[in-house]
Structures are given as C-alpha cells and as structure tokens.
Amino acid sequence: MVCFAGLDVSLNSTRVCVVDASGSVVKEGQAPSAPAEIAAFLRQGGRRYRHVLLEAGALSRWLYEGLVKAGFPAVMVETRHASAVLKGGRFKTDRTDARGLADMARAGLFKPVTVKSAETQRMRGLMSARSLLVAKAVDLEVAIRGLMRGFGVKLGVVSERQFHTKVVALTQNNPPIAGIVRPLLRARSILREQATVLEQDFTDRAHADPVCRRLMTAPGVGPLVALTYKLAVEDPARFKRSRSVAAHLGLTQRLSQSGELARRGRISCWGDADARRALFLAGRSVLNPRTGTSNLKAWGLQVAVRRGKLRAYIAVARRLAVILHRMWVDETDFRSAAAA
C-alpha cells in the first residue's frame, strides 16, 4: 500500500500523520524530533511511501538529510505555500497541521524547496556569526556615546579605528565616566577582534574559490558580496533564465492585478535577505563617485537622474544579480561593454 506522510516539526517532538491514497488516516502519533526516531515511527507496519512532507525550518535540513539517508522520499516544502494551504482548516493544532501536510503530499499540492548543502549551511553560519558580532559592537558604541553625552562629553564624528583612542582621550581626566566606559570599551574591542577573525576566514575562502574570484571582477563586488551571492544561489542551473535570480532574491516590483487594474509597488523583498542586502550595497558602491567608470555605472547614473538615487541603487543591484548569474553560467569575467 502506497502512503503519504506529513511531519509537523517542533523543537522537542514531531507530530506524524500517515494517509493512504484515498485520504484515510492510516496512522497518527508523535515522535521525538530526531531522524532516527521519526524513521522508526514511519517504518512501523512496513508501509511504502511516495512523499514524506515537512516544512522548511530550523531543524528541517537535519531531519531531511537523515530521512533521505534512511531511504524515505522526504520533501521539504515552502513555508509560505504550506501556511496558505493549512489556513483552510477550522482549527490550527499540531495534529491538524500534520494531517494537512499529509493531504498536500497525497494531492501533490506542494512546492519543494532546494535544500542547502552542509558546507553552505556552515558558511552561512560563519557569516551570520560575524554579522552578529559587528551588530553587538555597534550597539556598544551607541551605548558609550549615550553614556558620555549624559556627562556632557560629546564624541562627535569618529571612524571605527579611532573610536577607542578618542573615547580614552576624552575620559582619561574624568574618573567617574572612565570607570563606566572602560569595561564597555574592552568588550567592544573583543567583539571587533573576533569579527575580524571570522571576516578574514570567509575572505580567504572567497579568494580561494574560482567562482567567487570570477564574480569579484564585477564592479562593487567584493569577497563578502561574492560569497553571499554564491551561497544564496548555490547551483546556477536552478534558474533557466538569469532574470529569474533577481525575482528570487526579491529585487523585482510587486504586482497586484485584477482585471484591467494593475498596480506596481515596491520590491517584493522575498528570498535571501542577506544576498539582497549585499547586492544593494554593491549597487551603492558602483554609483560611488570614487568607483571607476563602466557602462553599468553610466546606466545607473541615468536611472538616478530620472528616478532618484535610492531607486538607482536597487536597479543596479537587480541588474548585478542578473549579470553575476550569467557570468557564473558562461564562466566569463565581467565585461563592461556587455553590462550595458
């Protein structure tokens, strides 16, 4: 008997529902959120499975890989699509969600998502850790400015490298504020130091990777942008058209259409937020007056004259997403004339 299973995953336990081809529930239950435990639950009764569905989430990649290794046809589905289907139920419980996922598997009403490799997951974790350290260091800098301002000491405009030196100089003759600020400065220095260590790690990896080296030939694209883009796309063959990458990363306009009415709004902001942010920063870098000339920059400046700088940054970021994918597929370096 061919069956279909739906898994509603939570941190400690997973609700499992198994249905047959007619939609009747064959087995329901709960298992610990571990691949071996879920596989043991599904093996009971010797049933054959056509699809085992689970939503994308924090534990999903780990459970997906474990179930595939155990021989189950696991499929990870898009969260937004699954949520839209499951909202049709009257009540929302773990049991009804598992049943809904099983019915989605039986009816074929699901959109599988690409599961990132373990190496991609590790590199994304490395870059997320660096971003977290930098964010906490910035929070400390803001707190130090606020504390000093309360004592009438104004820090003013200062670069990241000169921040520590200037704060020490301004507080050395003020023991009360120095006793408060110095521990925060030491914590900030440690955060910046460790962020630099992580940044050097992924920078070295970007320079050693042939794909990242090719992507870095484009204007505005450095190690961070190249590696972030590569991790977001991972496999360029996923996209038949290079223009689809811009839509996948949420850099295309929203469209709301009904009959003769069609409204276009801001960019959709779907997909990988880190890659979208990195491409936006690359677009700003391309239009920077200090950046060398290129046809891409000339085109972006024309957009800035017509639509403003912010929309020009987004337009250049969208075009960079397309260009980088084409460079990757064709295995060619950036050509200024072709970018226009």
Image: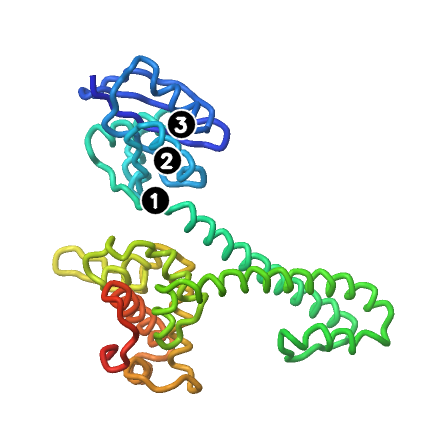
Q: Position of residue 304 (x, y in %)?
A: 33, 81
Up-down: is 338 above or below 61?
below
The amino acid on which the numbered mark 2 sits, given as a three-letter code, is Tyr
Q: Real-space Cα distance between discs 1 and 3?
A: 24 Å
Per the image, the residue denoted by label 2 is 64
Up-down: is 39 above or below 336?
above
Name the quarter where the C terminus is drawn: bottom left
160 sits left or right of 264 in the view: right
Q: Is the Cβ of the residue at disc 1 closer than 8 Å to that at disc 3?
A: no
What residue sits 34% from the left and 20% below the top?
Answer: 42
Q: In the figure, residue 210 lies in which quadrant?
A: bottom left
For residue 94, the mark is 3
335 sits left or right of 223 in the view: left
Q: Position of residue 29 (x, y in %)?
A: 39, 18
- Label 3: few (<14), some or many (≥20) within 10 Å? some
Q: Secondary structure at mark 3?
A: helix
For residue 115, the mark is 1
Q: Secondary structure at mark 2?
A: helix
Q: Nearer the viewer, residue 130 or 310?
A: 130
The amino acid on which the numbered mark 1 sits, given as a three-letter code, is Val
Q: Nearer the viewer, residue 209 or 49?
A: 209
What residue sits 27% from the left and 36% below the top?
Answer: 85
Q: Real-space Cα distance between discs 3 and 2?
A: 19 Å
Q: Secondary structure at mark 1?
A: loop
The amino acid on which the numbered mark 3 sits, given as a three-letter code, is Asp
Q: Real-space Cα distance between discs 2 and 1?
A: 8 Å
Q: Is the Cβ of the residue at disc 2 closer than 8 Å to that at disc 1?
A: yes
Name the quarter where the N terminus is drawn: top left
Q: Nearer the viewer, residue 230 or 279?
A: 230
Q: Position of residue 205 (x, y in %)?
A: 46, 61
- Count every numbered label the image shows and give the total: 3
Q: Earlier in the sequence, mark 2 or mark 1?
A: 2
